[in-house]
């Protein structure tokens, strides 16, 4: 089975976005990182094998969350 991976990463003007690794933005831009992480976790939990990778403002991976 394929793992569905969602990245939380910085966007323009201090905002945050959630992107599916398979391609495409999966929602609106968020004013804070916590809201973006919340959406990414929901999407990962809905997937059979989900994963969230959270990046910092520097673009580096800060932490990961795996579902199953």
Image (tube, rainbow, N blue to C red):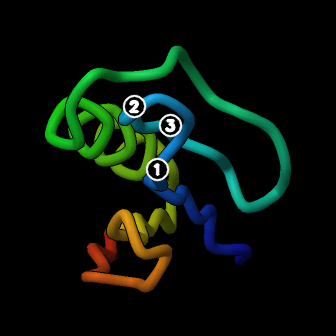
Quadrant location of residue 14? top left
Taking the spot 42% from the left edge, 75% from the top edge, the residue there is: 58
Residue denoted by label 1: 10
- Percent across and percent down for residue 16 are 41, 37
Please say if the residues under marks 2 and 3 sit with CB atoms less than 8 Å apart. Answer: yes
Taking the spot 21% from the left edge, 31% from the top edge, the residue there is: 32
Please tell me which of labels 2 and 1 falls first in the chain: 1
* Quadrant placement of the N terminus: bottom right
Please tell me which of labels 1 and 3 falls first in the chain: 1
Mark 2 or mark 3: which is in front?
2
Taking the spot 49% from the left edge, 74% from the top edge, the residue there is: 59
Indicate the secondary structure of the residue bearing disc 3: strand
Residue denoted by label 3: 17
Q: What residue occupies the far right of the structure in this picture?
A: 23
- Percent across and percent down for residue 23 are 85, 49
Mark 1 or mark 3: which is in front?
1
Q: Residues within 10 Å of mark 2 (few under 14, many from 20)?
A: some
Q: What residue occupies the far front of the structure in this picture?
A: 13
């Amino acid at each position: 089975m394929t793992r569905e991976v969602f990245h939380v990463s910085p966007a323009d003007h201090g905002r945050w976005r959630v992107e599916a690794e398979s391609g495409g933005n999966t929602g609106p831009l968020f004013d804070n990182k916590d809201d973006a992480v919340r959406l990414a976790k929901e999407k990962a939990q809905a997937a059979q094998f989900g994963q969230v990778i959270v990046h910092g403002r520097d673009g580096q991976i800060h932490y990961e969350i795996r579902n199953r």
